[in-house]
Amino acid sequence: YLRKFQNGKVFSYAIIMFVGIIVFASSLFFKFWDFILTSFPLLSFIIFLPLLGALLTCFISGSDKNVGKNVRDLALWISFAELILVLFIIFQYDSNNSNFQFIENKIILQKYNISYFLGVDSISISFILLTAILVPVCILYSKLSIKFRIKEFMVSFLLLEAVIMGVFCSLDI
């Protein structure tokens, strides 16, 4: 019974299984990539990511020195994640299309005609990129000047980033 497995058939079965796993994993990856490009709310995510960071910042506690370092690091990582997400949007943006892209439209209250309507064009996407680049730079340079109440400053700064991204993405003000 053992000799049957030692004659090379196990190796060929292992290769076939490995190829099958690679094909299955790649099909899952492409389905996930298609979901990200077609139905994942990218603009909502770049608005709500700094809000999530500001909320997480409120829960950091400890001594003032440790809190300041941890809060600044969290804000910096959130802003870098925001920059990477904005760069992803920039690379997916079709500059030949003059219409709004990455449109998200949700009706909130039909009776009062209140909706959540986001999208970007070439001007707004350049402002979004500029904001995403400047926020990490400002957080890095705030280390030189902001010495007290760092937690409150970073919460305010992340809220500011969320509001700026929301203004540049909003189509229905």
Image (spheres, grey):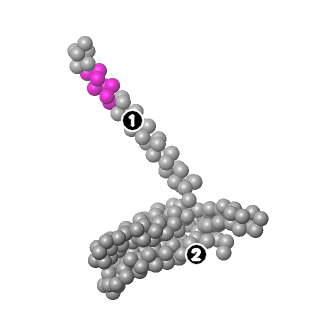
Give residue 103's quadrant in the image.
bottom right
Q: Which SS class for mark 1?
A: helix
- Residue that appears at 47% across and 42% down: 28
The amino acid at mark 1 is: Ile
Residue 80: quarter of image: bottom left
Residue 127 horizontal side relative to residue 2, left or right: right
Q: Nearer the viewer, mark 1 or mark 2?
A: 2
Extent of the magenta region: 8-15
Point 51% across, 45% down: residue:
31
- The N terminus sits in image quarter: top left
Majority secondary structure of the magenta segment?
Answer: helix
Q: Residue furthest top?
A: 1
* Residue 54 in the image, given as x and y percentages of width and height: 45, 71
Instruction: Using the image, tell me which numbered label, if any, was put on residue 21.
Output: 1
Q: Which of the numbered marks, if any, corresponds to residue 60?
A: none
Q: Can residue 9 be found in the magenta stretch? A: yes
Residue flagged by tag 2: what amino acid is it?
Val
Report if residue 137 is visible in the image: no
- Circle 2 Cα neighbour tier, 10 Å, few/some/many (<14 / 14–19 / ≥20): some
Is 164 covered by the magenta stretch?
Answer: no
Q: Which residue is mark 2?
A: 167
Name of the residue lying farthest toward the right: 111
Residue for point 29% across, 75% down: 63
Q: Residue at x 39, y 38 (%)?
A: 22
| Residue 77 pos. (x, y %) | 37, 68
Compare residues 16 and 145 and report the one nearer the observer: 145
How many circles with numbers are drawn on the protein?
2
If you read the primary sequence from the N terminus, does the residue marked by circle 1 or circle 2 appear first?
A: 1
